[in-house]
Image: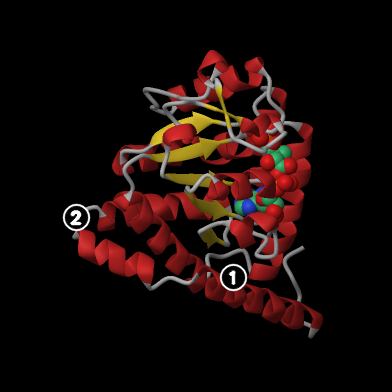
């Protein structure tokens, strides 16, 4: 039982949710470790969405609205932490949802598909025989993709990703939007747009942004995308983390 007034109540609730998803076969053990790495960066970012992340969210949503075939790639952690918002985002952006797993098994694909359907998804790509195409030069199970999903996509949103697939998707000529709390990761560095934020905050903010931008003109959307620099944004996020280290190292007490 997590006391409501515990300074880390929200973070502890998220951990409980992941453990529950582990029991239901949605998340893998390695997903808990990956989340722990993310938590460390989030701690230094102050566990809030920075203005730089907001800029990246705006550019990412504009890019998805301009896309012909946008696809949202979902793994175990993302399904567990933001299934409902993924479905909402896909519906506003007219994007397809595809299950794509590093630790792939048919049981997990189905469990994640069911969770997405429970949250309103009508069609889920990439499950079972549907994932019959391969991303070239990628050896992991993540290479298996749906012909009508990631394979044909021009823009792919990859929340919580490993670097190999991001690089491979970029080599295929796709635009890749990553959500990664680590601005130093290979994913963050090789994506077209990286949102340095927690998926639990970033995906709901993307839903809000999509509702606001969906009426914007094509020219305005292009202007938003063209004025965004991923390298500059990553540097700015790193500076926030550096400040976080100094703040906490300088005597300010963290919440843990
Ligand atoms: O469900 P599967 O089988 O596809 O496996 C998923 C995991 C997460 C195990 C797999 O994708 C993996 O091993 O990921 P990595 O390579 O550890 O990368 C995870 C990245 O996401 C790291 O850079 C973390 O800092 C970051 N991260 C972790 N939790 C969050 C996060 N970024 C945003 N929000 C989070 N909640």
The picture places residue 194, in percent across and down from the top left corner, at 54, 60
The picture places residue 8, in percent across and down from the top left corner, at 68, 57
Q: Which residue is mark 1?
A: 234
Is residue 58 left or right of 170 when viewed as pictured? left
> What residue lies at 72% left-to-right and 24% top-to-bottom?
23
Give the quarter of the figure containing the C terminus.
Answer: bottom right
Q: Which residue is mark 2?
A: 215
Viewer-closest of 66 and 111: 66
Give the quarter of the figure containing the N terminus.
Answer: top right
Q: Is residue 173 visible?
A: yes
- Total labels drawn: 2
**Image quadrant assignment for residue 143:** top right
| Marked residue nearer the N-terminal end (2 or 1) | 2
> What residue lies at 55% left-to-right and 53% top-to-bottom?
178
Q: Is residue 10 visible?
A: no
Q: Residues within 10 Å of mark 1 (few under 14, many from 20)?
A: many
Ligand 1 within 8 angstroms of badge 1 C-beta: no
């Amino acid at each position: 039982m997590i006391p409501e007034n515990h300074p880390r109540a929200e973070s502890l609730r998220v951990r409980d949710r992941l453990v529950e998803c582990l029991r239901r076969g949605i998340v893998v053990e390695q997903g808990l470790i990956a989340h722990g790495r993310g938590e460390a960066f989030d701690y230094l970012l102050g566990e809030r969405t920075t203005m730089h992340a907001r800029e990246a969210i705006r550019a990412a949503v504009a890019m998805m609205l301009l896309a012909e075939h946008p696809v949202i790639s979902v793994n175990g952690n993302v399904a567990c932490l933001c299934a409902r918002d993924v479905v909402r985002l896909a519906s506003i952006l007219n994007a397809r949802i595809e299950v794509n797993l590093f630790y792939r098994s048919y049981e997990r694909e189905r469990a994640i598909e069911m969770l997405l359907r429970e949250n309103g998804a009508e069609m889920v790509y990439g499950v079972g025989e549907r994932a019959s195409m391969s991303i070239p030069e990628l050896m992991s199970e993540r290479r298996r993709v749906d012909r009508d999903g990631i394979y044909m996509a021009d823009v792919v949103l990859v929340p919580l990703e490993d670097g190999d697939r991001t690089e491979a998707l970029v080599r295929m000529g796709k635009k890749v939007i990553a959500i990664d709390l680590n601005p130093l990761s290979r994913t963050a560095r090789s994506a077209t747009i990286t949102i340095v934020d927690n998926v639990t905050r970033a995906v709901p903010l993307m839903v809000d942004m999509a509702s606001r931008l969906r009426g914007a003109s094509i020219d305005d959307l292009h202007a938003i995308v063209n004025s965004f620099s991923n390298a500059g944004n990553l540097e700015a996020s790193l500076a926030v983390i550096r400040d976080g280290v100094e703040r906490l190292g300088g005597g300010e007490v963290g919440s843990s």
